[in-house]
Amino acid sequence: MSMNNVLLQKILDCRNESQVAGLMRFFKCGPGQYGEGDRFLGIKVPATREVVKECWKDVSFKDLEECILSDYHEVRLAALLCLVQIFSNARKSKPSFCNVFDSASQAGGRDAGWSMLQKRCVDFYLAHTDRINNWDLVDLSCYSLLGEWLMDKDRSILYDLARCGKNIWERRIGIVSTMAFVRKGQLDDTYAIADIFLLDEPGKGQAREAPLHDLLQKAVGWLLREAGKKDEASLRRFLDSRFKTMPRTMLRYAIEKFSPELRRYYMS
């Protein structure tokens, strides 16, 4: 461990052995479960957020690399939350970790600097998706970073992740990242990517015969529900031609905010 990695040191100082067993049960780390083999320090998310809030400005990309490669779930989460902070604050500050500002400002001014920094964050994120290996790690990072980055860019990478992701976590990133668009009232990508999961067509060289994983059903249903909160009529149009063949968990999540009468209709 690097002695200068303040993020890693502060997270390790927060370890609480009494909470390890509970977190391992919650994140399904038993044999054959989706989180099998993960290790925990016993730190809950609010405590991790407090550490990140305190020290993200003093974290380098080298520090983030050390943390994202950690065996401990909470250390990887801290790295991702730091990355989100760096990305989100790139426009308005010049943190000590960011040498990219200096070189970029000489080449194209401050705007070029923060854009390069944000791109570096996104590149780091996509290079380490194998370390983003549970639903909380996905959900607390992807739309605040990758989704926001793609607001004014080509979004095909999300379709590729949803269709051809190497595991359920990359596929979940593909749909959950669209939350950034939904919050701005842009719903088309959420519906289009949801259709990928409804058809569940395998990507090139992949074979998928098992039912769609429960965590993917829940993610798609959740994003459909959020789209429906923006425009219920559009969600109803989407569901009307699909609900009879939609997996039950996905459908139940999607219609959660509908009236009791509508929920009964769709669940029937």
Image (spheres, grey):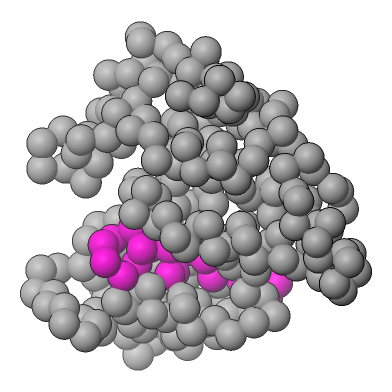
Closest to the observer, 225 or 105 = 105
Magenta-drawn stretch, dominant element (helix, strand or loop): helix
Residue visible at 33% across and 33% down? Answer: 71
Closest to the observer, 95 or 255 = 95
Considering only vertical position in the picture, is 14 above or below 50?
Answer: above
Is residue 191 among what the camera can see?
A: no
Q: Which image quadrant for residue 199?
A: bottom left
Lateral position of residue 23 relative to residue 247, left or right = right
Q: How many marks?
A: 0
Q: Position of residue 101 (x, y in %)?
A: 81, 57
Considering only vertical position in the picture, is 83 above or below 26?
Answer: below
Q: Position of residue 169 (x, y in %)?
A: 34, 58
Q: Position of residue 14 (x, y in %)?
A: 51, 15
Lateral position of residue 203 relative to residue 72, left or right = left
Q: Which image quadrant for residue 194?
A: bottom left
Q: Which image quadrant for residue 148?
A: bottom right
Is residue 187 among what the camera can see?
A: yes
Residue visible at 53% across and 57% down? Answer: 124
Considering only vertical position in the picture, is 221 above or below 19?
Answer: below
Q: Position of residue 187 (x, y in %)?
A: 58, 79
Residue visible at 16% across and 78% down? Answer: 206
Closest to the observer, 16 or 186 = 16
Closest to the observer, 100 or 73 = 100
Residue stretch in magenta: 165-185
Q: Is residue 27 magenta?
A: no
Lateral position of residue 85 relative to residue 162, left or right = right
- Quadrant (top left, top right, bottom left, bottom right) of the C terminus: bottom left
Lateral position of residue 202 relative to residue 70, left or right = left
Residue visible at 58% across and 27% down? Answer: 5
